[in-house]
Amino acid sequence: MTGLPLIFAFVIAIIIMIVAISKFRIHPFLAILGVSVIFGLIGGIPLVKHGKVLGIADVVSAGFAGTFTSIGIVIIMGALIGTLLEKTGAALKMADCVVRLVGKNNTSLAVLIMGWIVSIPVFCDSGFVILNPIRKALVRRTHCSAVATAVAMSMGLYISHCFIPPTPGPIAAANTIYEGMGLEPNLILVIGLGAASSILPMIAAYFYANYIGTKVKSKEERAESAAPEETQQTYEELIKSYGQLPSAFMSFAPIIVPIILMGLSSAMAMAGTKTDIITFLGTPIIAISVGVILGILVLMQSTVPDKMKAFYEITDETLKVVGPILFITAAGGVLGKVIASTSMVAFIKENSNTLASLGIFFPFLLSAILKTAQGSSTVAITTTAGIMAPLMGTLGLGTPMLAAITVIAIGTGAMTVSHANDSYFWVVTNFGDMEVQDGYRAQTMGTLVTGIAAMINVYILYLILG
């Protein structure tokens, strides 16, 4: 099956998957894998490998392994940092510092801005895992909505991830488009316009996060609302149970140091002055491992008894919690790989000329279609940039300024929308402690609202600067 029937089959497959998970309570891992295999066979993937054409089992294996390769260890080590910070009271110390800075009534705004800053050098998946301990502690400290803070932080991370170099997607798009026009990539201009294009989506994300926080509750919030009042531990009692909290410096170090290492590596790479040691330390796996070491130091300085036994138990507990998240996230990677192995993406690319009359909205729509179809924002950005490069003059976008605006428009589409074939959807849904159907209301709708607001922002810049 090819062409429009295949796209229709894809829509039906996503609906079946959602119904299977939410209505019939089939585990997401099995539901996603099952739908992936069936859709792959419908899409023409052979049963077994023929020459260079992979069979369905090979595609499933490649999608599963690819997800583990890219973010598997990062998720495990990031979660381990989170558990260490939680068990030592460091997360509560960080929450207190943030609350003193922004006030108890501005928690969603605080995590939104925090996410936007952190994701400039750090992938949004890693950023969410790294920042999640602070978010959870803030929820407990301020009694704000857990879902509102999860969505706000997710959107903040996502906006800069798709808009602002040195994240790989925007850099690759800028290089492709500028070089296709015979120009040197102007990354400073792209960074500036990316920041300017963040204004409306940040506002939209803030209001949507607070709105959905009144409609959707996390699993923990539901459990607490059902528990008798006297069994709920107050924040003050929780603080007291830790004895002496770590210092602010040591509390933040396991999170801030990995961010600095990754940011320094990205900045030096962008400037063309990178060194082996900085590149090594800035690799996400290594940088977050440094964070784990700093987290262990926090544990060693804490009042926790029998520290080696405690560290073993913390590691064991983390692996038990992260296991289901990893497998569901990997299943989402399978779905994305299966879709990419069919002719659907090629069909979209071949028929892109029908959208070319839309001007600056063309790269947004094309990137959004590719993002929704195959899941990866980076793939959507790089693929769309490759299509756009030879069309810039034809579409009236052939100036350095309009090229930079086009890069941001592509990034805007690449965040619209995040759903089951996107690993980030599962990171936010699971670490945000949401049911799958609530993840669609919170994360998927959140990326739709934020993406539309971002495109409005881009169009305003286009009218002013074009």
Image (cartoon, rainbow, N blue to C red):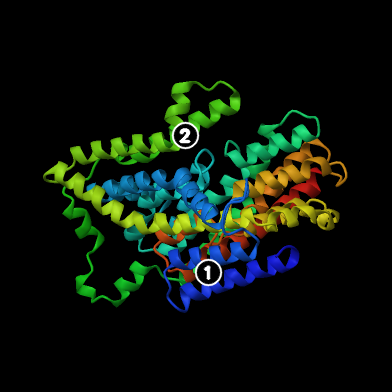
- Residue tagged 1: 441
Q: Residue at x 69, y 57 (%)?
A: 343
Task: Report whether 465 appears left or right of 8.
Answer: right
Q: Secondary structure at mark 2?
A: helix
Q: Looking at the rendering, in which quadrant would you find the C terminus?
A: top right
- Who is closer to the viewer here, 224 or 272? 272
Percent across and percent down for residue 403 are: 77, 40
Q: Is residue 409 above or below residue 442?
A: above
Q: Evaluate whether residue 416 shows in this view.
A: no
Any part of residue 201 in sight: yes
- The residue at 72%/53% (across/down) is 346
402 lies above or below 329: above
Q: Is residue 146 left or right of residue 232?
A: right
**Quadrant hosting residue 261:** top left
Q: Quadrant of the N terminus?
A: bottom right
Disc 1 residue crowd, few under 14, some 14–19, many 20+, Cα 10 Å: few
Q: Earlier in the sequence, mark 2 or mark 1?
A: 2
Q: What residue would you read off at disc 2? A: 262
Categorize mark 2 by other alpha carbons within 10 Å: few (<14), some (14-19), many (20+).
Answer: many
Q: CA distance from mark 2 to mark 1?
A: 32 Å
In this rendering, position of residue 241 left or right of residue 51: left
- Residue 33 to residue 385: above or below: below
- Residue 180 placed where, x, y %? 78, 35
Q: Label 1 amino acid?
A: Arg
Q: Residue at x 75, y 63 (%)?
A: 3
Judging depth in this view, the residue of 131 and 140 nearest the camera is: 131
